[in-house]
Image (cartoon, rainbow, N blue to C red):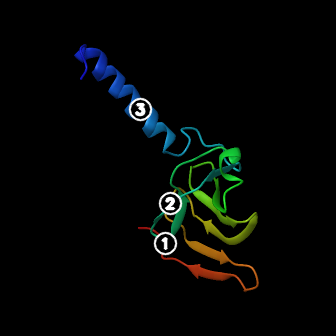
Amino acid sequence: MCRLPSLCVWASAALLIATTAAEARPERIRAGHSYYSDDFSVVGVVRDLADEKNFEEVYQSYRYYEAVYDDRDRVVTFKQIERGEVVREDRYRYTGDAAAPVEHVVKTPGRPPERTQLDPPG
């Protein structure tokens, strides 16, 4: 039980903000740079990091994920890495300012790329 209610409220708020920040993509994404996580989410056909982590936190894991974004914070490349090897790579192509991709290419070792043309937004 907290004896200073206002202090407890501030401490709870700080903890919530710290937790939220730790479980989100970076606030400022640098286009063309790689970001990493040990979890991912899917919205439509786009795979994205569930929570960004430092490479040092994930590289020793059995499985981790790498994402590269464009200058509009859209995923352009998403890789699934297991035991240090890329086992799946998703590439997305966008037109203009559209949030949804118009093309999705999946590459897996030993198989030809699977290319899907998607309906343009709007």
Q: Residue sitting at 70 percent across and 78 percent down?
A: 108
Residue 39: quadrant of the picture: bottom right
Percent position of residue 100, x then y: 49, 64
What count of labels does the image hold?
A: 3
Compared with 17, 110 (above or below) is: below
Give the residue at mark 1.
120
Given contact means CB atoms under 8 Å apart, are the residues at marks 2 and 3 in contact? no
Q: Nearer the viewer, mark 2 or mark 3?
A: 3
Q: Which residue in the rendered view is the most extreme toward the top?
A: 4
The front one of 114 and 61 is 61
Q: Residue sitting at 25 percent across and 20 percent down?
A: 2
Q: Callout 3 environment at 10 Å: few (<14), some (14 to 19), or many (20+)?
A: few
The tag earlier along the polypeptide, 1 or 3, is: 3
The front one of 61 and 76 is 61
Instruction: Inspect the image, locate mark 2, and give the three-letter code of the amino acid beneath it.
Output: Ala
Q: Which element carries disc 2, helix, strand or loop?
A: loop
Give the residue at mark 3.
17
Q: Which element carries disc 1, helix, strand or loop?
A: loop
Q: Is residue 81 left or right of residue 51?
A: right
